Each structure stands twice: as structure tokens, then as C-alpha cells.
Image (spheres, grey):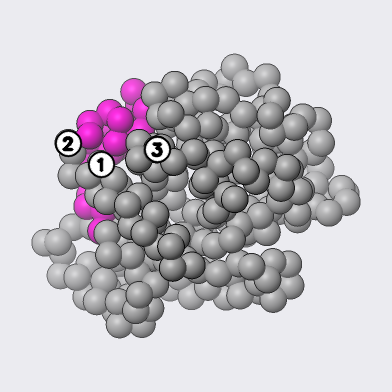
Amino acid sequence: MARIFAIANQKGGVGKTTTSVNLAAALAATGQRVLLIDLDPQGNATMGSGIDKRSLVKSVYHVLVGLATLTEARAPAPEGKYDVLPANRDLAGAEIELVELEHRETRLKRELSAHDHEYDFVLIDCPPSLSLLTLNGLCAANGVIIPMQCEYFALEGLSDLVNTIKKVHANLNRDLKIIGLLRVMFDPRNTLGQQVSAQLEAHFGDKVFRTIVPRNIRLAEAPSHGMPGVVFDRAAKGSQAYMAFAEEMIERMKTL
């Protein structure tokens, strides 16, 4: 039975896509069967997995509006040994079309239910906004992984996101819970970063993952080569952190 996780944060530029792509590749490297769903019209997770978003015939857009099945739209990541349900600019139009469709918040969930035994992990890269696309991701998920930088404004956005998750839990998805907070782009020389990190641990306790992903240039370079950082340079500190995070996720699944 697949464990489905939305990787979400309403603040942009906090490493959601980097986390989605590298966690997918790291889990696949440990032998897990993984599907990565790109729910962002920018299609960065698609490109970062080595799939050209400009040449897509079928995408997550077609799945959401009922023009294709997941089987027809998914594609293997060339380097990562996981499957991708890709996205491109077409997905921006889905926002408008979904409004008039039946079960608009749960269309992704309904499609995934038919593939429950094909994967061990399903990761959903959500856009940085509370939209119908994000709602589809949250309604389909068992839990939310929140990547965040250790800075003041990230704390401000976190309270908004927690409130959003509580509302979705109360009204649309009773299974939804926060799995954990992942500290990313961390610079240990930054005093403020250390203070915010300590605040997170004090307030959220074991909801904060042990793994900390450092700021790492090799992770930033990897998408331009069309592959996850853990494949591009396995020895880089950032890649090693995501491999450790994958192991921590597998370990945490045993206690959920």
C-alpha cells in the first residue's frame, strides 16, 4: 500500500521541488517503488527529473480533467529509477477547468486509488499557493512534509500552512497529518538560522526531522543537467543529506 506525501509550503523558494526530486531519487536508490507527481505548472520537478516538459503528449493536467489515466501519462525518470507524472504550462488551465468539474478537490485521489499497490511512496510536489491544485495534493495525501529555511519569514508562513492543513483535515481529508518539518538550505555559520532551528525543535519536537540539508551548490547545479542531485553527485553534502533523509523517512514509516 502506497504512502502518499504532499511536499508543501505556501512560501516560494524554500526547496520544495529540490526536496521532492531528491527524496524520490534517494528512496528509489534504496529499492523503494516511487512515483513523483508534479503539481506545479512551472514543471520544475519534471525537468529536474530529466523529462522535457515541452514535448509532453500527456501530463498531470490530462489526468485531472479526465482526458487520460495515470498509466497513460506517467513516464520513467531517465536517471532516477522512479516514475513521474509530469507537468507543464497546460496545468495552469486546469485551475479554471476544475472549478466546474464534479469532485474537483479529490480527482487526483480517485486516480491514485487505482494504483495503490504499484508504489511504496508517492510524492506530490505542490505549487507555492493554496489553489485547487494544492488542495488536490492535500486531499490525496496521508501526510505533509514541510521543507523550510531557518529564517524569520519562514516561521511566519509556517503558521499559515499549519492552519491550512488543519482546515483540510477537518473538512476534506481526515487522514491528513503533518509528517514532519525538514530544515533545508541550512548554513551552520548563521546565528539566526541556529536560533530558528532551535525554536522549531522546541515547538514541534519530534515533528522536526533529524536530517538537516545544508546549502549546497551541487544540488543547485543538478537540474540544469536534468537529473536529481543524488544522482548528479552522490558524494556532495546535500546529496548525502537527502540519502539520510530517505532512510529517516523509511524508518519513520514503521511508527506511523
Which residue does the numbered mark 2 point to in the structure image?
235
Q: Is residue 130 left or right of residue 80?
A: right
Q: Does residue 247 appear anywhere in the picture?
A: yes
For disc 2, the neighbor class at 10 Å (few under 14, some 14 to 19, many from 20) is few
Which residue occupies 30% across, 47% down? 242
Residue 27's disc is none
- State which region is magenta: 212-234
Which residue occupies 44% across, 45% down? 20
What is the distance, in whole Å, between disc 3 and disc 1 at their CAs? Answer: 17 Å
Dot 3 or dot 2: first in sequence order is 3
Which residue occupies 87% across, 48% down? 101
Discs 2, 1 touching: Cβ within 8 Å = yes
Whether 16 is drawn above or below 45: the answer is below
Which residue does the numbered mark 3 point to in the structure image?
31
Mark 2 residue type: Ala
Q: Does residue 9 appear anywhere in the picture?
A: no
Q: Quadrant for residue 210, please give it.
A: bottom left
Which residue does the numbered mark 1 point to in the structure image?
239
Q: Where's residue 1, x and y in %? A: 59, 50
Mark 3 residue type: Gly
- Mark in the foreground, 3 or 1: 3
